[in-house]
Amino acid sequence: MTVQLNHTIVRCSDKHASASFYADILGLPQPTAFGPFIVVQVDNDVSLDFADDHGEPHPQHYAFLVSEQEFDAIHARIRERGITWWADPAHKVEGEINTNDGGRGLYWDDPDGHRLEIITVPYGG
């Protein structure tokens, strides 16, 4: 048997707004309700289950591996919404894209301060 990540709970202040933010920015299907969660399904059978009743959000890091075309589309949506992005996780190089590991990557924050990342090549190339 292989071990696979199935889902993770994303603590947020408004589960509907947060789930919609992720789905819209990432170009994913609209969120669905499952029990107390609002769920965003990503393409590798992993879901982000948004919860606004699990206590205060504590910023986490969520990284998404995307194709070159998806990167361009997500970057365009970030720019269209006036969201600040960085080339680095420390948020020191604003408005630039990194080319680490032979691909492209960038970071931005969601409304609750979770640090989001898109990369076109996994770490280590």
Image (cartoon, rainbow, N blue to C red):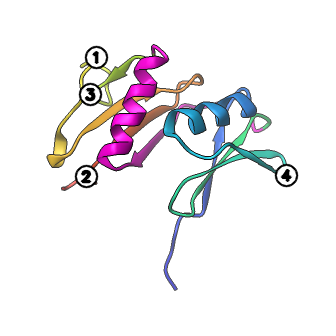
Is 65 inside the magenta-drawn segment?
Answer: yes
**Dot 1, how many residues are within 10 Å of its Cα: few (below 14), some (14-19), or many (20+)?**
some
Q: CA distance from mark 3 to mark 2?
A: 14 Å
Q: Residue at x 39, y 27 (%)?
A: 76
Question: Please, what is the three-letter code of the amino acid marked with disc 3?
Answer: Ala
Query: Which residue is identified by label 3?
Result: 87
Q: Which residue is mark 1?
A: 94
Q: Which of the labelled discs sits on residue 35, or is there none? A: 4
Residue lying furthest right in this view? 35
In the image, the segment drawn in magenta is: 54-82
Whichever of labels 3 and 2 marks the residue nearer the N terminus, that label is 3
Whether 108 is among the magenta residues is no
- Labelled pair 3, 1 in contact (Cβ < 8 Å): no
**92 vs 5: above or below:** above
Labelled disc at residue 123: 2
Left/right of residue 2 with respect to residue 96 in the rendered view: right
Q: Residues within 10 Å of mark 3 (few under 14, many from 20)?
A: many
Q: Earlier in the sequence, mark 4 or mark 2?
A: 4
Q: Which one is nearer the viewer's eye here, 114 or 28?
A: 28
For label 2, the crowd category at 10 Å Cα-Cα, with few meaning under 14, some 14 to 19 and many 20 or more, is: few
